Image (cartoon, grey):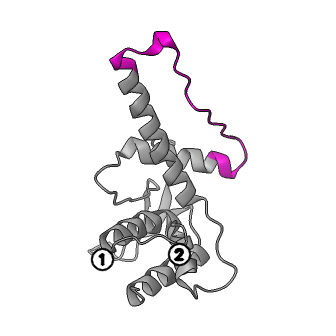
C-alpha cells in the first residue's frame, strides 16, 4: 500500500527555478517489470520478503490435496492459478533473498548466482536484461531495501555475462 500520510523524504531539486531547494515527497520505489507480472504481485512479494527478513513471518508450503469431491473443472483451474502464482512468488522471493558473495564475481557460476540462476543455467540476453532490471530496482542503494555491495555485485555479474557469452 501507500506510505503513511506523514511519511515524506526530503530531496534536493536538481533543475528549474527551484534548483537546490529541498522538497518533501512520498518515498517511492520505481520498478520496471516484465509483462507477465502485475504490480500487486510485486508488492506482495516485496512485503513477504521484508517480513521474512525481519523474522516476523515464516512460510511453510504444502502440496494441495485433491479429494474425490474436489474435482470440478472450475476448482482445478483455481488450483492451477494458485500454483502458478505460488511458483512466481517463490521465484521472486528466491531472487530477492540471495546472500552476497564474499569476494568479487570471478566466474560464470558466480555471475549466475548473483543474477539468481543456478550454475548450469543458460539465460538469453533478453532474459538477463529483464532479470537485471528487476534486481536493480530492488538492490539499488537508493531503493531503501538495497545496498551498495549487492548493486556492485549485480553490475559485475551482468558485465561478466555480457563479456563471456560461452
Residue in the picture at 50% in, 80% down: 157
Name which residue lies at 46% across and 86% down. Answer: 160
C-alpha span from label 1 to label 2: 27 Å
The picture quadrant where one finds residue 77 is top left
Mark 2 highlights which residue?
A: 151
Q: Nearer the viewer, residue 80 or 146?
A: 80
Asked whether 73 falls inside the magenta stretch, the response is yes
Q: Which residues are magenta?
A: 51-75
- Looking at the picture, how far across and down is residue 159, in whole percent? 43, 85
Q: Position of residue 153 (x, y in %)?
A: 55, 79
Instruction: Name the image quarter holding residue 79.
Output: top left
Tell me if mark 1 has few (under 14), some (14-19) or many (20+) residues whose alpha carbon lies within 10 angstroms of its own.
Answer: few
Can residue 5 be seen here? The reply is: no
Considering only order in the chain, which callout, 2 or 1, is on the residue closer to the N terminus?
A: 1
Question: Total label count?
Answer: 2
Residue at the outermost front position: 68
Q: Position of residue 90 (x, y in %)?
A: 53, 48
Query: Which circle marks residue 23 in the picture?
Result: none
Q: Nearer the viewer, residue 58 or 40?
A: 58
Q: Secondary structure at mark 1?
A: loop
Residue displayed at 40% across by 41% down: 40
Q: Is residue 104 above or below residue 98?
A: below
Q: Which residue is mark 1?
A: 15
Is residue 102 rendered to the left or right of residue 142?
Answer: right
Asked whether 1 or 156 is in front, the reply is: 156
Check the image and report above or below for 163 versus 80.
Answer: below
Q: Is residue 17 above or below residue 28?
A: below
Picture layout, residue 115 above or below residue 46: below
In the displayed image of the protein, which residue is found farthest to the right? Answer: 55
Amino acid at each position: 500500500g501507500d506510505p503513511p500520510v506523514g511519511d515524506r523524504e526530503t530531496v534536493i531539486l536538481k533543475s528549474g527555478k527551484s534548483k537546490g531547494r529541498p522538497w518533501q515527497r512520498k518515498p517511492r520505489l520505481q520498478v520496471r517489470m516484465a509483462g507477465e507480472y502485475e504490480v500487486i504481485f510485486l508488492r506482495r512479494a516485496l512485503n513477504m520478503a521484508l517480513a521474512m527478513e525481519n523474522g516476523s513471518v515464516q512460510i511453510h508450503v504444502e502440496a494441495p490435496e485433491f479429494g474425490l469431491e474436489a474435482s470440478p473443472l472450475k476448482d482445478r483451474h483455481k488450483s492451477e492459478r494458485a500454483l502458478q502464482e505460488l511458483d512466481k512468488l517463490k521465484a521472486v522471493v528466491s531472487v530477492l533473498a540471495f546472500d552476497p558473495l564474499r569476494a568479487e564475481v570471478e566466474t560464470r557460476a558466480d555471475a549466475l548466482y548473483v543474477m539468481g540462476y543456478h550454475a548450469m543455467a543458460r539465460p538469453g540476453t533478453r532474459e538477463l536484461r529483464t532479470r537485471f532490471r528487476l534486481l536493480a530496482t530492488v538492490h539499488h542503494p537508493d531503493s531503501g531495501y538495497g545496498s551498495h555491495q549487492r548493486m556492485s555485485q549485480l553490475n559485475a555479474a551482468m558485465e561478466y555475462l555480457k563479456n563471456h557469452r560461452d
